[in-house]
Amino acid sequence: MTDRSDEQAIPSCQNRPTTLQKSSSPLLSRGSLPFGRPHRLAMATLVPRTYAFCQIFGTTLWLALEEGHGWSLILPGLLLLLWPAVALGHTALAKDSKQAEFNNLYMDCLLFGIWSALLDYYALATLLIGLACLMNNVAVGGLRRLALSASLFIGGALGWGALTGFDPRPYVSVGLDIYQSIGAVIYFLAMAYVMYGQNRQIGRSMGEIKFRNRVFHALLELGVVANRASNIHTLLDDSLKHLHADFPEYGFAVFLQERQRPEVTRYAAVAGLRLGAEDERRLASLLAKLHERPENTIKLRKKAEGEQLYATPMAGRLSMYDGWLIVRAPRLDAALERMLTLFVDQLAAATENKLLHLALKETAERDGLTGLYNRGFLESALQLSIQGKSQSPSLDFAVLMMDVDGLKEVNDRHGHVAGDQLITSVAERLQMHCRASDILARYGGDEFVVLFPSADLSAANRLADLIRTHIEGQRCLITAANGAQVTLELRVSLGGASSTDVPAQEVLALADERMYDDKSQRRKQRAIG
């Protein structure tokens, strides 16, 4: 009725409370009753056991009526007929329900042995009953239980015979033989069906365990994939590719939308999934209704057979975004449905952690006043350029240093708040003329540096010309400490250098030197003028 893989007993009785639960009824609450659900083995054998005892009772009744034994056979048969109910109650009350059912199978052998003696060892009944007992026990315990169950059956038969006397009856009638044979066939088929059901259940359990192991393994690796990602786009792409590699029979897609603007899809990734026109229409409808915050997985396809699309919301799992995880399954998949929330939780957690990491990283890399890169980030980027030059001599880089002239005078005359406004104004104008590949950083109080990776001095000269043309001499309006509006003229000293001029480690120093030379010349010119 089960296989040896089920050997470790799993108690199925619920823990019994030490005190009565509060209830409006004077009766015991349901949770405090000492009954638990019997082991599945006991539930599976209940019907066959009841049938077997009833069938043998029918044989007993047949003999009693045919040979005139009356109540001398019927009364013991009625008492033995109570055993299936007693056995079920025994498993329900036992702490170890499974072991209790194993003991019940032994008791079956003993009782059937006694019943065989009551029937005066009617040959066909004794043979079939004995075979049934042996089959039941060998199925759950192997040869050891086979030997013990045979001993109990024979002991019960011989023991009862020793008490009441031996008067064997090897044969009764053709009709009783037919009845007994039909009953035995039905019983054996029933037991075979029970074994089949148990094996199917075990197979389903093993399949679900394997699927869960795949899921948990994928979730563990998903964390590693997420940590390697440099941004959210890469995280989502790599995560879905990882999931699709672990579950090639499924397709995956994820959509994240801004919470304040649900019509804007900020991030999207797809792996192994193509959506049809109808699926896209339904998905668009779902994405437009994120504010309704559905909590359960939705089936996008209503058909019961064929491919199925599941949509699981991320509502409430992310601080800044909402979205959906879309999964294509080759069919309706109950195991997948139970696991989808784990995928969504893990993906949402990885996304949220990456967003936090990127925010912290940006905070650490950015200057608090201007929002430009800070000195630490610039020095790290410069070091990478120096290493690149040492590994590939043809790979040049350039640097342009800038100093805002007159910042000290502004701070002294109008206050540091006014000086900060001047710095911010210069930073905004510099950003307008820098390319996406240029690294603009605030290097110090009034100093800015632009790093040009993979460029020579012409890149620095180009930006210097733009600054002289579009920034130098322009006026900006600032507010002094006393609240007065002050107009200032922007003046910037510049100095550029590249790895074609000096060794890579000396580029920044040369740019700094040239910047101070420019500052000195400008001071002289203003003094003369």
Image (cartoon, helix red, strand yellow):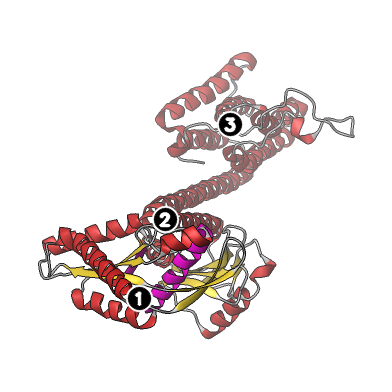
> Which residue was labeled with disc 2?
361
Q: Earlier in the sequence, mark 3 or mark 1?
A: 3
> Which residue was labeled with disc 1?
434
Where is the C terminus found, in terms of image quarters?
bottom left
Residue range in magenta is 416-441
Outermost residue, top side:
163
Q: Label 1 sits on what residue type?
A: Cys
x, y percent for residue 411: 47, 59
Q: Is residue 69 left or right of residue 121?
A: right
- Judge the density around disc 2: few (<14), some (14-19), many (≥20) Cα neighbours within 10 Å: few
Q: Label 3 sits on what residue type?
A: Pro
x, y percent for residue 470: 38, 82
* Residue 429 higher or lower than 318, as above or below: below
The residue that appears at 42% across and 33% down in the rendered structure is 142
Q: Quadrant of residue 229?
A: bottom left
Q: What's the distance in space between the residues labelled 3 and 1, CA to CA?
A: 72 Å
Residue 101 visible here: yes
* Mark 2 secondary-structure assignment: helix
Q: Is residue 166 left or right of residue 372?
A: right
Q: Quadrant of residue 334?
A: bottom right
Q: Label 2 sits on what residue type?
A: Lys
Q: Earlier in the sequence, mark 2 or mark 3?
A: 3
Q: Does the magenta-highlighted stretch encompass residue 81?
A: no
> Which residue was labeled with disc 3?
11
x, y percent for residue 259: 61, 67
The residue that appears at 66% across and 73% down in the rendered structure is 289
Main SS category, magenta section: helix
